[in-house]
Image (cartoon, helix red, strand yellow):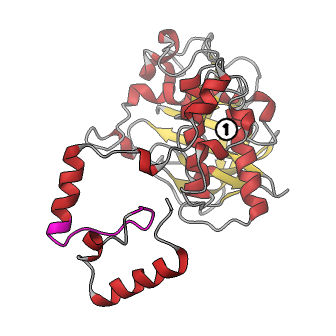
Amino acid sequence: MSFQIKCIAGLTEGRSHMESGLIFHRYLSKSRESTRGETDKENTEGWNESLSASSSSPASVDKLSQPQPDIVVITEHIKSGYLWDFWLGNHSKYGQVVLKLVSTWDYPCMREGYWEYIAPEDILGEAVNEERFYTGPLIDLQGNTIPTFYGTYLSSDGENYCAILLEYAGHAIGPGLVQLDEEWRNNLYEAYQKIHLRGVSHGDTSSRHVLIDDQHRIRLVGFRKSAPITLTDGADVLLMMYEAIDVRVQIGNEKPSVAQLHTLPAIYYDQVTDRDEFIKSIQPCSTKEFVLPDYVAKHDQWLKDQGLFTPDLDSDDYLSDSTCSSLDSDEKAYYKEQEAKYGSGSGT
């Protein structure tokens, strides 16, 4: 399968030097079931050579499956990330699509000092890792909870492009802070729960990876950092549940005191080998049973002595005399008023 790029008149060029005439061929991964860390050397080594039409082998790049490439008309530059540029287009066969495109000579995280450096020879591995989740454990969610995946592609013009083609699945609700009502929060949590229960940790919790389509459905994208989870392994499930908590706090804006492990649906840990022991391990413990290490207690006392201690409103002793000594008279009066009204703290 192949496609050719056509740009509408006046389209602003992005950093991937988008231009009409580029032809892409489907990259056929030989090891879709393997995951990040299990490198398919035959597919990822020799990256620069595999991008060129003259040196790509038929086994890895599908150049012969059709005589004429499909046409993708690029209509808009959606946004640029630290690896991919995102373009909106119309595919002659699939309809409205999103083209994720990167050129190996011009992308931000190619700089070695960048906080998340990705070497040019590793780009194909990043794309293949994402494909393995779309076409593996999440395949039955395509077109519903995640976009339909149309493949990973390499350019055939010798200019070293890599691309992913996806169904257009709506607008991102992020980045940044969003306000969701209870119905939308539940839809969001259900979407993440679906990928979690298929043994996938998303790996990059952010509102920019949450889309709302024209049927008002939540769609999740951005599986480049995803990792497999064994649903019978308590340690794996615990990490997955922490991600579910992150979703509730970072995107759902729930308070950390409300979004806790023991409040998550039991279906998350139903398959854990020692389920009863696991349930015990996620129960909240009383703060009165927790004893600070000596060095922490001494440091807190030093802060109080210096008048630098910031009261923790969730702490049992935030209204103690030693804490209030660092507050001015108005602050003391306010906290004492709150103590009289609501009690001395969350642990009482």
- Residue under pointer 1: 165
Bounds of the magenta span? 304-316
- Which class describes the residues within 10 Å of circle 1: few (<14), some (14-19), or many (20+)? many
Task: Tell which of 188 and 106 is nearer to you.
Answer: 188
The total of numbered circles placed on residues is: 1
Question: Type of residue at label 1?
Answer: Leu
Residue at 23% from the left image edge and 58% from the top image edge: 300
* Residue 77 versus residue 200 in the image, above or below: below
Which residue lies most toward the right here? 215
Please tell me in which quadrant of the rendered image residue 112 appears: top left
Task: Tell which of 157 and 176 is nearer to you.
Answer: 176
Percent coordinates x, y for residue 43 in the rendering: 52, 14
Percent coordinates x, y for residue 286 in the rendering: 49, 48
**Predominant secondary structure, magenta span:** loop
Residue at 30% from the left image edge and 41% from the top image edge: 111
Task: Tell which of 281 and 86 is nearer to you.
Answer: 281
Q: Which quarter shows the N terminus? A: top right
